[in-house]
Image (cartoon, helix red, strand yellow):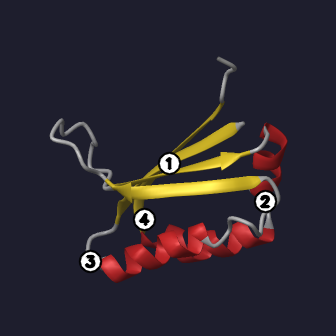
Amino acid sequence: MTRHYGMFQFKEGISEAEIENCFATMQDMVGKIPGLLEMEHGPYDSTEGLNDGFTHGFIMTFDSPESREAYLPHPIHEKVKDVVVPKLERVVVFDFNVLPK
């Protein structure tokens, strides 16, 4: 499995409704892009304060690195980026392959 993890800092003035729409649009990719098994997301929730201004995170699970690579230029993903990216001040994405136990 491959995990695709990201953190978002939304631009000032972006409403909760707009944020919810971003994540709903992202969630809608599950089942439409081959190999994208699931997506989880939520707002930052810790007293540590180590989020460096990032307010929301997500984790996508792919069945393989090849599926993740096919997802990146996929037309559905490109349409989702058109919705989400203009609302972001900053984004960090980190991918890793899950090692066997």
Decide: few, some or many residues near mark 1? Use Cα within 10 Å; few <14, some 14-19, many ≥20. Answer: some
Separation (CA) of disc 4 from disc 2: 19 Å
At label 3, the amino acid type is: Gly
| Residue 16 image offset from top left, x and y in percent | 31, 77
Residue at 79% of width from left, 71% of height from top?
75
Is label 4 in a helix, a strand or a loop?
strand
Please give the residue where the numbered disc 3 appears in the rendered image. Answer: 13
Please give the residue where the numbered disc 2 appears in the rendered image. Answer: 73
Please give the residue where the numbered disc 4 appears in the rendered image. Answer: 88
Which of marks 1 and 4 precedes in the sequence? 1
| Residue 51 image offset from top left, x and y in percent | 28, 42
Task: Locate residue 96: give its quadrant.
Answer: top right
Is label 1 in a helix, a strand or a loop?
strand
Which of marks 2 and 4 precedes in the sequence? 2
Please give the residue where the numbered disc 1 appears in the rendered image. Answer: 6
Residue at 52% of width from left, 67% of height from top?
85
Which of marks 1 and 2 precedes in the sequence? 1
Q: Nearer the viewer, residue 86 or 17?
A: 17
